[in-house]
Structures are given as structure tokens and as C-alpha cells.
Image: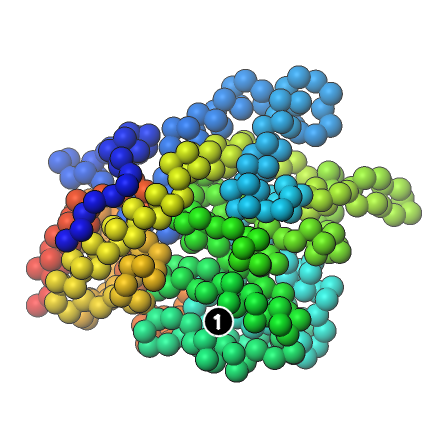
Amino acid sequence: MHTETLLDVATIRADFPILHQDVRPGVPLAYLDNAATSQKPLAVIDAMSDYYLRYNANVHRGIHKLSEEATVAYEGARKRIARFINAASWREIIYTRNTTESINLVAWSWARTNLKPGDVILSTEMEHHSNTVPWQMLAGQTGIEVHYVPVTDAGVLDMTAFDEMLDERVKLVTIMHTSNVLGAIQPVRQIADAAHSVGALILVDGAQSVPHMPVDVQALDCDFFVFSAHKMLGPTGIGILYGRQEILDAMPPFMGGGDMIKRVELSGSQWNDLPHKFEAGTPSIAEAIGFGAAVDYLTKIGMEHIHSHEVAVTAYALDRLAEVAGLRVLGPLKASERGGLVSMVMEDIHPHDIAEVLNHEGIAVRAGHHCAMPLHHRYNLTASTRASFYLYNTFEEIDRLIEGLYKVKEVLVL
């Protein structure tokens, strides 16, 4: 099997002290839960610590050295994030708490302003709950409709059904770039072109794509793009909403308060310019600085190299998983057609039991519905076990996963 990679994984792993520990005496950690959250390199931790140790202050209006330095670091991170996804302007980058808040911002601000009863939002069966529940809530309150494009038995979006369901009633197509369960990578540019042909906008959930592959929002021609720092080596509690500047300019604020205004009178207020119109209150300053450090780290290594490494690790995992009798992998079976994760089910063994035995062997995976209950129902499943990979994972860790799965069969199969 092919086990070569463009990355110096040993050197990369040295930047992540958390990976060098034993789950129990003599059993080292193999962290394969990156789709839920990634680990953080020292560069990110040090950048956040440096802010708290050396120039902790609020941003934007403080006329003193610490505030000025904090503002430069905070806004500098925004500009580097804009370059990372090739946004046309740093003003198109809105700091939020996470992917979920970014989607809710669009639902509350853009959708409530622009949609009317009878309009359709077109989503899919494979979406994360964060890209399903906000639209359901909106539909219940406004009379719009949410329709769902089906997923095939092979675990990919049914593009024939998409074409049939897309008409001029559709005002927004909202879709994940890479499935957090199936691993399937969607043809976003094709979908965007089709959406725009009927006058609809497109929102792309990039939580599972931006950390793992080069992303160019202009080349994808998306109107909104959302993702989270914590899945791409950054801290929790901060995410991004990218939106086309002309669309964001026309949207009302999501929340009111400080920093999102230019002027306040008792008779009314004047909103701030982008991006601050959508960033009410004291922001997550340390987290933004850490986010910028994470982007720097990924950029230095190269997203093409990271993606190539993950394809190789995933291909190796798919080959080895095929050896395990009674195990079924969900989604496409070609590593080139999927992200760096595999969700699996095994005979009559509950996914939580699989995860527990693997944990005893030092292997951290995720078990459950992965915030995608409708997708699991589509395949008559209540849950699955997911192993997900990143730039610091090794082929040897895949071998340990396979050994762990044989241990599962030994312990739990009667």
C-alpha cells in the first residue's frame, strides 16, 4: 500500500505536545477525532499567551500602546484569514463564535429581510444540524419552505434530483462543502452556477473543507461561506462568516450594542461600516489572534501538501478497513472523492461500544450521529463511529485503528 507523504509529520508532531501522552500506562494516544476539533500547535498557544502576558487590552478605540497593539494583531488576523480563503476584501470577513453562529447570522439578517412566505431554501439530507435547524426555525416563523436534496445509496448528493428541485422559487441554496459523516466533497462551483442561474444565493458550510484543502471563495463563486477556527488548529469560540461585500452592506445588523455603531442618538443609531456592523460588543480578541497564528501555521506548511497527505492517509485507511470483515464504510470509497475521515458501522456492535474499546487501546474516535441525525436515518442507522485525520496523523496510527477494530471483534462479537 502507498504510505508516502509530502509532509514531515514527525517534525509537525513535535509542535503538538498534547499528542505525546499515554492514555494509560504504556498506551500512547492516537488522536483521530479531528472532525470534531483539532489539536493546537505551540505557535497558536504562544500567540494567545503573548497577548495576555504582554498587551492585553480592548481593541479599536483605546488611545494607548496596549490597545493599539491589540487592534493591529486582531485586525491583522482578519486580513490574513481573508487572504487564506482569497476573499476580495478583508471587509468581507466577519468574526463570529463559530460556524453555527455564522449560519444563524445569515438566517436572521439576510433571510428575514429578503424572503417571504412561499419562498424556498434548498438544503440537503446530509447537512450538519447547524445548517438545518436555523432554517427550520425560520420556516416555522415566516412561512418560507425548506426542501432537501436526497443523498444516493453511494453517499453522494443526487445531482439529478438537485437539478429537478432547483427552480425560481428557490432563493437560497445552503450546502456543506465536505460531509462530516460521508466525507463526500460537493461540486460547489457547479451548484453555485446553477443557483445563480435561477437568481438564488448560495451559502457553503466549509467547516470540514477549509482546514483540509485549498479554498478560494471567489473561484467557488459562493455568496456566503462559513467555518470555525477550532477545526483548523485554532482556538474554540471563534469562527468566520464570509459574505460578498455588496450583500453584507445591504443586510441589517445581527445584534445591537457597542462597536457596531458609528453614532447613537436617543432618536436612532447609525450602523458602523463592514465588518464591524456585525460584531457587537467586546470581541474574542485572544481567539482572533490565535486564529491568525493557526492560519499562518497552515499557510507555511501549504494547504496543497496537507490535502495530499490526508488523501494518502485516507486511501490507506480505506484499504485497511476493507480487510475487516463485517465493517461497512459510509460514503464514497475513493479517497480522492472525500475528505480525511471515515464513518463506519460494524455488524451488530453499537458505535459507542466500538469507541469505548478503541479508547482503551488509546485511539480517540467519535461515536454518535455527529449532529447529522437525518442523514443517519436515511441509511437506517442511529449512529456511526468516525475516525478523522489531519496533518499530524500517521500511517502507523491507521494500523493501530485496524488492530483496535480487531480487538473490538474479539471482545464484543459472541
Whether residue 336 sits left or right of residue 95 in the image: it is left
At x 42%, y 72%, the residue is 157
Whether residue 30 sits left or right of residue 278 in the image: it is left
Position of residue 267 measured from the top left corner of the image (x, y, whole percent): 91, 47
Colour basis: rainbow
Residue 136 in view (yes/no): no
Whether residue 183 sits left or right of residue 402 in the image: it is right
10 Å crowding of disc 1: few (<14), some (14-19), many (20+): many
Which quadrant: the C terminus? bottom left
Q: In what element is the residue under mark 1?
A: strand
Q: Is residue 253 above or below residue 69?
A: below
Residue 296 in view (yes/no): yes
- Three-letter code for the amino acid on which mark 1 is drawn: Thr
Q: Is residue 255 above or below residue 27?
A: below
Residue most toward the right? 267
Q: Is residue 414 above or below residue 252?
A: below
Q: Is residue 210 above or below residue 57?
A: below
Q: Quadrant of residue 331?
A: bottom left
Position of residue 192 measured from the top left corner of the image (x, y, whole percent): 56, 65
At x 18%, y 67%, the residue is 327
Q: How many marks?
A: 1
Position of residue 152 measured from the top left corner of the image (x, y, whole percent): 37, 76
Position of residue 219 measured from the top left corner of the image (x, y, whole percent): 54, 55
At x 57%, y 42%, the residue is 82
Whether residue 1 sits left or right of residue 73 in the image: it is left
Residue most toward the front? 219
Question: Is 411 or 104 nearer to us in this picture?
Answer: 104
Residue most toward the bottom? 164
Q: Which residue is mark 1?
A: 124
At x 38%, y 28%, the residue is 42
